[in-house]
Image: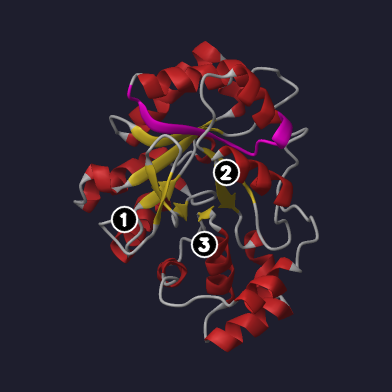
Amino acid sequence: MNQATSTPALMLHDGVEIPQLGLGVFQVPPEKTQETVERALEAGYRHIDTAAAYRNERGVGAAVAASGIPREQIFVTTKLWNTSQGYEPALGAFEKSVARLGLDYVDLYLIHWPVPSEGRTLDSWRALERIQLDGGARTIGVSNFRVEDLEMLEREAEVLPTVNQIELHPHLQQAELREWHAEHGVATEAWSPLAQGELLYNATIAAVASRHDRSAAQVILRWHLQLGNVVIPKSATPSRIRENFALFDFELTEDDMTEIAALDVGKRIGPDPADFA
C-alpha cells in the first residue's frame, strides 16, 4: 500500500511503485487544472496523469508545489506528443515538459501514441531510455501501443516499457493486450475507464451498483482495480473526485466480475492507434 494514502500500489518491473488509482486531467482546462489537482490531492490521490498535448502541465506542477505534500509522495506522469517523436526531438520535448511542470523529474514518462506511419517509435523510445538513465524519469512506458508495437520494442530496445496506457473499459476490454502485458510484466493502465460516461447508464452496471449500494462509476472503477489495472478517471467536479476515490472499502464478487466481462463489444471511444497520427 502507498504509505501516504489508502491507495494500493503496483510494483513495476523496474522496481518503481505506481499508485493503482490516479486522476487524469485530459480535457481539464488549463485555468482550472491547479484547483482540480489540489482538490484531488486533498481527497487522497497521489497519482496525477497529464501530457504535453493537454496543455495543462503548468497547473499540475503548481498544484504539486502548493500542496505541501513531499514531492516523493506524488506520482506524476506526462507524455511525449506525436509531433515531437524522434531521438533529439523527444529529448527536447521532455525538457520543456519538466520546465512547465516545474519539477526536477517525473515519475513516469510515456510515448503518447505509436504513430506507425512515421516510423520514429524506436528512436523515441531510445530517447526515453536515455531520459531514465539520466534521472529525468523514474520509469518509462508507452500509451496506445498495439501488440505489434510492443513486440518491436521487445526485439529492438534495451528495456521494455513498464506501463502501456490504453483505452480500456467494459465495452473495450483489450484481452489480447492485457494477456501480452501479463506475460511480459508490463502494467496495464486504463484511460477513458468509464467510456466517457457512456457506461454509467448501462443496466448491468446499474444492477451491480444497486447490490453494493454504490454508484455506477465506483463499480466500474472497482472492476478495473480487481482486474489489476492502473486506472485514471478524469473529473473536475470535487464531489466526483471524492466519489471516484472511495473504492477501497468494498469488493465485487466473482459473479459481478463475470457479468461485467460479458459487456465487451470491442467498441472504441477514442482513435485507433493503427492510423492515428
Can you tell which mark lies on residue 187?
none
Identify the residue under disc 2: 165
Relative image position of residue 34 (x, y in whole percent): 35, 50
Q: Secondary structure at mark 3?
A: helix
Query: Callout 2 environment at 10 Å: few (<14), some (14 to 19), or many (20+)?
Result: many
- Give the residue at x 73% y 46%: 176
Query: Callout 3 environment at 10 Å: few (<14), some (14 to 19), or many (20+)?
Result: some
Residue 79 vs residue 258: left or right? left
Q: Which residues are magenta?
A: 135-148
- Give the residue at x 70% y 48%: 270
Identify the residue under disc 1: 2
Q: Is residue 270 above or below residue 158?
A: below
Q: Which of the 4 image quadrants contains residue 201?
A: bottom right
Identify the residue under disc 3: 225
Q: Along the polypeptide, which appears first: circle 3 or circle 1?
A: 1
54 and 217: which is toward the camera: 217
- Give the residue at x 56% y 29%: 81
- Do labels 2 and 1 touch, CB within 8 Å? no
